[in-house]
Amino acid sequence: MNLRRSALLFAFAAASLFAADPAVTQAKKQIAEKNYDGAITGLQTASKANPKSAEIKATLVDAMLAKADSIMYNDALPPRSKYPDALRGYRQVLTIDKENAKAKTSISTIESIYKSMGRPIPQ
């Protein structure tokens, strides 16, 4: 009986160690609701409190990518407003995850669009 109780306590302790950060849980809900700014703000605050959390960092990158994608692929926005805003969003992702392939590819795509039009690339 003692061995079973010890195993149960160990399982409980292990589960609590791997439980999702409340900020991440909330942010994932906000991302699903397309409230990207709310998710980003909450995760930035959580990141300051726990700067080494890979879970917070990964979710923050996801939220930033989702926001940039929502701008980039919004057909209701004119190109002159969506491309610079999306470009800033993808660049912001690279400040957190310097090797993010999705952000790099999207930046390259937007920059190619500007080059093909003979226009300067927004900073």
Image: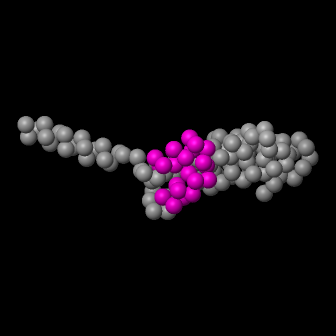
Magenta region's main secondary structure?
A: helix
Query: With 88 as the anchor, is 20 left or right in this view?
Result: left
Q: Is residue 109 toward the left or the right of residue 93 in the image?
A: right
The quadrant the N terminus occupies is: top left
Residue 36: within the magenta?
yes
Q: Which residue is at 80% across, 44% downward?
A: 77
Against 21, is 73 above or below?
Answer: above
Point out the stretch of residues depicted in magenta: 24-46
Instruction: Give x and y (percent) for residue 10.
Output: 21, 43
- 81 to the left or right of 97: right
Q: Is residue 98 visible?
A: no
Up/down of 97 relative to 102, above or below: below
Picture coordinates of residue 64, whole percent (x, y): 62, 49
In this rendering, would 47 be left or right of 78?
left
Residue that extends furthest to the right in the rendered view of this protein? 118
Question: Could you tell me which residue is drawn at 31 percent across and 47 percent down?
Answer: 16
For the view shown, which residue lies furthest in the left direction? Answer: 1
Q: Residue at x 84, y 42 (%)?
A: 113
